[in-house]
Every structure is written in structure tokens, then in C-alpha cells.
Image: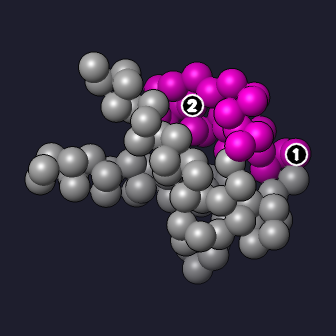
Amino acid sequence: MKTEIVEEKSIRRNLYRVLRKTGVTKENICLSASFIEDLHFDKIDWTIFTYYLERIFNISIQDEEISKFGKVNDTLHYLRGELHYLSN
């Protein structure tokens, strides 16, 4: 259980790192933030975001999956599932 909490914090911390690299200010980062409405992502932001997600988490994300990310929390859920799958 404790390992899961540490892993969750690590995933969230790295996701926030990716958002910062995309140009999102620290104050605007929250799980309920919408990529379009709150963070004002455009095509370039999505490209940068995807690049850093794949590099930092050492995963490959299909375009169909990225299009499902409406909020930051959607990305966190995806990463939890993907990283859990890869660890088994």
C-alpha cells in the first residue's frame, strides 16, 4: 500500500513536470484542469506534451489515446494503467 502511495506521488510529480515543460505555470496545474479550456492547449502544446510524456515515462502513446485526455486527471489515470501494465 505504501509503495502505491509513493508511486502515485512520483507519477503525479512527473506529470506536473511534463506540464511545466509544455509551458503551463505552476499555479494553473491541478487535476481538474481542462487542457483546452483551462490550459489553452493548441496543436503545438499537444505535440510537446506527448513528446515529454513519452520520454519521461518511457512509454509510447497512440494518437487515439491522447485525444481522450480532456483533463489532467485523465492523463493521470492513463499513466497509472499504462505503468501498472508495463510493470507486470
- Give the labeled residue for mark 2: 54
Q: Is residue 61 left or right of residue 46?
A: left
Element marked by disc 2: helix
Find residue 81 and report its image quarter.
Answer: top left
Q: Nearer the viewer, residue 21 or 5?
A: 5
Residue 67 location (% of width, % of height): 76, 40
Q: Is residue 19 above or below residue 61?
A: below
Residue 28 among magenta residues = no
- Give the labeled residue for mark 1: 43
Q: Residue furthest right?
A: 43
Find residue 73 and report its image quarter.
Answer: bottom right
Between the C-alphas of marks 1 and 2, the distance is: 17 Å
Q: Residue at x 39, y 32 (%)?
A: 83
Q: Residues within 10 Å of mark 1 (few under 14, many from 20)?
A: few
Visible residue check, residue 46 = yes
For the image, the number of numbered tags is: 2
Q: Do residues under tags 1 and 2 come within 8 Å of each other at their CB atoms?
A: no
Q: Which residues are magenta?
A: 43-68
Residue 75 location (% of width, % of height): 57, 48
Q: Is residue 15 left or right of residue 34?
A: left
Q: Residues within 10 Å of mark 2 (few under 14, many from 20)?
A: few
Q: Residue at x 88, y 45 (%)?
A: 43
